[in-house]
Image (cartoon, helix red, strand yellow):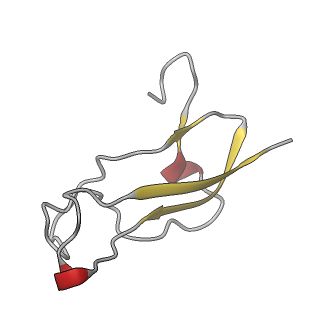
Amino acid sequence: MTHSALGLRDSHGATRSVPVGPEGTWNDFQTLPKESSRIDFVFVDPKLIVDHYAVLAWHYEGGRPASDHFPVVADLSDCR
């Protein structure tokens, strides 16, 4: 995606602040996986500013994640 004609950027590397949360996004339904890969991404247009990037590894009821992937979020703003 980042090497296509679109010129998209990976928001993890483009964020202006320190990324929040674990590096990996796959959790296999484990609360704190020992090993995890970053397999979920937010790709952004080069004209956008990535203010914040986070992987949300929060757990509720019983400590089991709701999905086998942690949510990935990016706060974006226009560079105009």
Q: Position of residue 70 (x, y in %)?
A: 31, 61
Residue furthest right in the image: 80
Seen in the picture, residue 7 relative to 49 is either above or below; the reply is above
25 to the left or right of 17: left
Classify residue 16 as left or right of residue 19.
right
Q: Quadrant of the C terminus?
A: top right
Return the residue found at the far front. 61
- In this picture, residue 2 sits left or right of residue 75: left
What's the residue at 41%, 45% (across, down)? 41
Q: In percent of the image, x 49 and y 53: which residue is there?
A: 12
Count of marks overlaid on the render: 0
Which of 23 and 58 lies nearest the eye of the viewer? 58
Q: Is residue 3 left or right of residue 63?
A: right
Q: Residue at x 35, y 68 (%)?
A: 22
Q: Please state the horizontal and vertical placement of residue 14, each as a whole percent of the image.
A: 59, 49
Q: Give the residue at x 62% y 66%.
A: 17
| Image spot of residue 11 (x, y percent) | 53, 48
Return the residue nearer the eye: 7 or 31: 31
- The spot of residue 74 in percent (x, y) is 55, 55
**For residue 1, what is the image quadrant?**
top left
Considering every residue shown, the one lying at the far bottom of the view is: 62
